[in-house]
Structures are given as structure tokens and as C-alpha cells.
């Protein structure tokens, strides 16, 4: 187990180092998230809908779309110079490869979310003073699940000719459950509702994480090995 | 035609053994029933025209591709089983460098060293770059290197973990004369040290001084294999007859 963990950290470290050098996906995702928020900000009619009703959906749509951009890079980096062959040839357990990719993707998506959240507060003028620990918690809980699914679909899509188009088509249906749960919890947090009203949705998010992280880890070998 | 009918009981398994190896892409069969064995100290050069299936054969031998039929064993272990235990002893040089464009050469090789569990990965990576004459370029990105230097870096990555079996696809591509001669010399030393090498090429002259056996692959069929003949010129006319050139 420590060996698997060491190898997973090596894979994640490599991805993060490469991304920090190129900054391609991270910058694109952040700029994209900012643009989505700007568009929503100008498109909404403040007299028709209260901010607190609209804001959770806008936040999670922004997170989901930006995450998609960040996830696209997970395996495109491996396609350059057939670097994936180097990974597959090495005595690297596929579980370690999945865990490494998952950790790196979580780092990217959480970074995008961490930068997007203050922009969201700025554009929508929502008060997170009492609810920010909850918002951070539900963001982490929802992100782990859809990033796990995104990691495996990214590995699958990269083998196709239209990887950038395939990933959203494959991933979006699987993002629906965590997005619904996250929007519900965020709405209640912004409205200052008690924790007991969110417990059901939090359980759903936790269950989704456990089920899909496990399933994706188990299926990953079949996806990356021809 | 070589055969691999099993290992005599008690004898060590061959370094590399392929039995009845076939591969199809859709309806098109690109490799037909290939049998080969390789013992330590042997270098098998596989020649053939473009599209003969040489690179596909190498990927099958490396375990990167699943055969449609047949199996590959490395030191008696299935190449695709046991979480890559058999693959640990393989060094593959393919058409592409397997290097990340956004990592320096040193970072690339250090990462590879970590994957293979090499102690002091950074030092091992630096030593490999020094051996390849690339120490001064350790901090450069692969995309900024010339094709020849990139090939040298790819070779350094291939040999980093001291593999016992080298699978080399056109290893002399883009190398200048001095680098090519140095690689030939290193390969001869490796053979003396007991490594096995499979060299895939369509320029036999480049590998002639290294190969101990020559095989010819035409349209996915293993049409000829023998110990290396004495003279290249003598073989070339025979080769032309085999490939129909």
C-alpha cells in the first residue's frame, strides 16, 4: 500500500508540475469560469428572480463546465509523444495510476473552484460569512465524485478522435446526481437553513463518492489497458 | 522458421518467447502466427518493408497491445499479467519519445526512475543523461530539442532502469554518425552483459553490426529467420527477393 501511494503521488506530482509549467488548462478553466459568471450576471433579471434562488445553480453550472475543461487535460498530456506507453509499460499498478490522476485532477478542479468562488461572491453579491465552511465542504464532497468519473472518462475519451467533444457527452449525465445534491445543499446553506434539512442530500453526495470512486478504480485497468 | 515449443524441464525459460502471436485490426490481420524466442546475449533484427507489422509486433512483445491470438512471455511470465512484473525488465524505444513536453529532460527521467522504484531517482536520471551526452541539456524541454537529441533522450529513458530486454523500434533514426556508432557499441556491450535485444528496422545496414539473428516480416508473416549471414550485400539480394522489391 505505501508503494501504491508513493507511485500515485509521483503521477500526481508529475501532472501538477507539467500543468504549472504550461498553465494551459488551469488558466483556460479559470478564465472560462469567470466568463460564465459574467454572462450569467448580465443575463439575469434581478427583478424577476432573487439572487439567493439563482446563485446556487449558477455556481454549480460554472463549476461543472470549468471542471470539464480541467479534466480534458488529464489524459491529453499522456497522448503527447505517446507518454501513456511509458506509464503502461512501467511496473505501475493501475490503481496507483488512477489514484495519481484523481489526485492531480482534484487539485486542478479545486484550484479552479477556489478562484471561482470569490468571483461568484463578487458578481452575485451573496453573503457567505456564515455559510462558507459548509460551501467548502459541499464543494469538496461533490467534486470528489464527479472528478473520479471524469478521470476515467477522460482516459476513455482520449483514445477517440474527438476527445474534447466526447468527454462532456460521456460525463455530463453522470454529473447530474452530484450537481442536484450540491445545488440543493448550497441553496439551503445560502438561505441559512439548519443542517438537518441538508442531511439527506449530503448522504447522497457521500454515497455517490464512495460508489463511483470504487467503481472507477476497479474499472480503470480495463479502460487504459488495451 | 523458428519455433518455441516450450522449455525443457529444469531449464531457465527464454528471455522472450512469443507463441502463435496474431493481431487483427477489425477484419485486417496484420500479424499471422508469429513464433519467436530470444535468449540472453542475442539480438534479433526484424526487417521488413513499411506496413509489414514490425511496430505492431514490438507493441505486442512489450505487452502494450493485446494479441488476437497467442501469448508473449518474458522470463517465463506472461507479459500482460501480474501487475507488470514481467514488464519491469523491458525497455521499449518506440517511434515516439514517451517524454512529456512540459517537463525538462531531467524531470522526465526522474519521473521514470520513480515509476521503476530506482533509489535516488534524480541522481539516476542525471547519470543516464550524462551517459547519453545530454547532461548540459538536462534542464531543457523535449520540444526544444532537435530530432537527434530527442532520440538520444528517448534512448536514455529506455535504458534508465537497466532493462534485461530491449525492444527498439528504428533506434538509429535521426542519430548522427558518432551517436549511431556509440549506440551500436553500447548495444554490443549490453549483449555481452547478457541482455536480449529485438531491433525493428527497415535499414538493415544500421543494425548489421549488432544483430546476431535476422528475421524478415512481410505482410505480417514471419517469412525468414536465420543467424546473421556473413555479408550484408549477400543478404540484401535475398531480402529483396523475400519482400518482392
Image: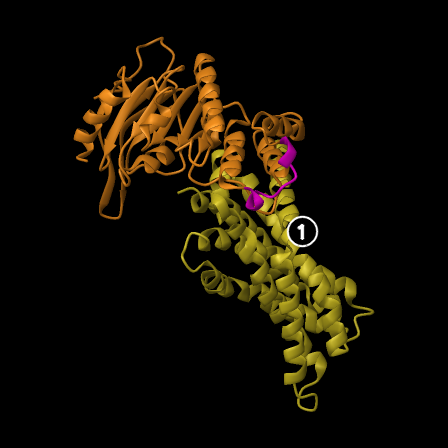
Chain colours: A yellow, B orange
Residue A191 seen: no
Per the image, label 1 sits on a secondary structure element best described as: helix
Q: Percent from the top left, x then y, of residue B217? A: 25, 31
Give the residue displayed 49% in from the left and 26% down from the top.
Answer: B178
Up-down: is A218 above or below A25?
Answer: above
- In the rendered image, residue B138 lying in the magenta stretch gets the answer yes
Give the residue displayed 67% in from the left and 73% down from the top.
Answer: A56
Q: Percent from the top left, x then y, of residue A77? A: 54, 50
Of residues B232 and B18, which is closer to you in this image? B232
Up-down: is A198 above or below A147?
Answer: below
Of residues B153 and A187, which is closer to you in this image? B153
Give the residue displayed 72% in from the left and 59% down from the top.
Answer: A137
Question: What residue did someone put label 1 on?
Answer: A20
- In the rendered image, residue A189 lying in the magenta stretch gets the answer no
In this image, B153 relative to B27: left or right? Answer: right
User: Which residues, given as a range, are shown in magenta?
Assistant: B135-145
Q: Percent from the top left, x then y, of residue A207? A: 59, 56
Q: What chain does badge 1 belong to?
A: A
Amino acid at each position: 500500500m505505501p508503494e501504491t501511494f508513493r507511485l500515485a503521488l509521483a503521477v500526481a506530482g508529475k501532472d501538477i508540475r507539467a500543468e504549472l509549467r504550461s498553465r494551459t488548462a488551469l488558466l483556460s478553466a479559470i478564465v472560462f469560469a469567470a466568463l460564465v459568471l459574467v454572462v450569467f450576471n448580465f443575463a439575469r433579471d434581478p427583478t424577476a428572480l432573487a439572487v439567493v434562488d439563482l446563485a446556487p445553480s449558477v455556481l454549480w453550472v460554472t463549476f461543472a463546465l470549468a471542471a470539464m475543461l480541467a479534466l480534458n487535460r488529464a489524459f491529453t498530456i499522456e497522448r503527447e509523444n505517446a507518454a501513456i506507453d511509458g506509464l503502461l509499460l512501467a511496473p505501475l499498478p493501475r490503481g496507483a495510476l488512477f489514484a495519481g490522476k484523481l489526485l492531480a485532477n482534484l487539485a486542478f478542479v479545486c484550484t479552479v473552484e477556489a478562484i471561482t468562488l470569490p468571483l461568484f461572491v463578487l458578481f452575485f453579491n451573496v453573503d457567505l460569512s456564515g455559510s462558507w465552511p459548509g460551501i467548502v465542504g459541499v464543494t469538496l464532497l461533490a467534486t470528489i465524485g464527479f472528478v473520479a468519473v471524469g478521470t476515467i472518462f477522460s482516459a476513455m475519451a482520449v483514445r477517440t478522435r474527438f476527445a474534447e467533444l466526447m468527454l462532456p457527452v460521456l460525463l455530463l449525465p453522470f454529473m447530474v446526481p452530484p450537481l442536484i445534491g450540491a445545488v440543493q445543499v448550497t441553496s439551503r446553506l445560502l438561505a441559512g437553513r439548519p443542517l438537518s434539512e441538508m442531511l439527506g442530500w449530503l448522504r447522497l453526495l457521500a454515497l455517490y463518492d464512495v460508489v463511483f470512486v470504487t467503481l472507477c478504480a476497479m474499472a480503470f485497468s480495463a479502460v487504459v489497458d488495451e | 522458421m523458428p519455433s518455441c515449443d516450450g522449455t525443457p524441464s529444469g531449464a531457465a525459460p527464454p528471455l522472450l518467447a512469443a507463441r502463435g502471436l496474431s493481431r487483427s485490426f477489425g477484419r485486417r490481420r496484420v500479424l499471422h502466427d508469429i513464433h519467436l524466442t530470444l535468449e540472453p546475449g542475442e539480438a534479433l533484427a526484424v526487417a521488413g518493408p513499411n506496413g509489414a507489422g514490425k511496430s505492431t509486433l514490438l507493441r505486442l512483445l512489450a505487452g502494450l497491445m493485446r494479441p488476437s491470438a497467442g501469448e508473449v512471455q518474458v522470463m517465463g511470465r506472461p507479459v500482460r499479467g501480474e501487475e507488470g512484473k514481467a514488464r519491469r525488465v523491458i525497455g521499449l524505444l518506440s517511434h515516439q519519445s514517451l517524454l512529456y513536453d512540459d517537463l525538462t529532460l531531467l524531470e522526465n527521467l526522474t519521473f521514470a526512475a520513480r515509476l521503476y522504484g530506482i533509489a535516488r531517482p534524480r541522481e539516476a536520471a542525471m547519470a543516464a543523461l550524462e551517459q547519453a551526452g545530454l547532461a548540459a541539456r538536462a534542464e531543457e524541454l523535449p520540444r526544444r530539442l532537435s530530432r537527434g537529441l530527442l532520440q538520444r533522450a528517448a534512448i536514455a529513458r529506455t535504458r534508465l532502469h537497466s532493462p534485461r530486454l530491449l525492444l527498439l523500434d528504428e533506434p538509429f533514426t535521426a542519430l548522427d554518425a558518432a551517436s549511431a556508432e556509440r549506440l551500436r557499441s553500447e548495444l554490443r556491450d549490453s549483449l555481452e552483459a547478457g541482455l536480449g535485444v529485438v531491433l525493428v528496422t527497415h535499414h538493415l545496414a544500421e543494425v548489421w553490426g549488432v544483430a546476431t539473428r535476422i528475421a524478415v516480416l512481410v505482410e505480417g508473416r514471419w517469412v525468414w529467420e536465420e543467424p546473421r549471414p556473413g555479408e550484408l550485400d549477400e543478404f540484401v539480394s535475398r531480402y529483396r527477393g523475400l519482400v518482392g522489391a
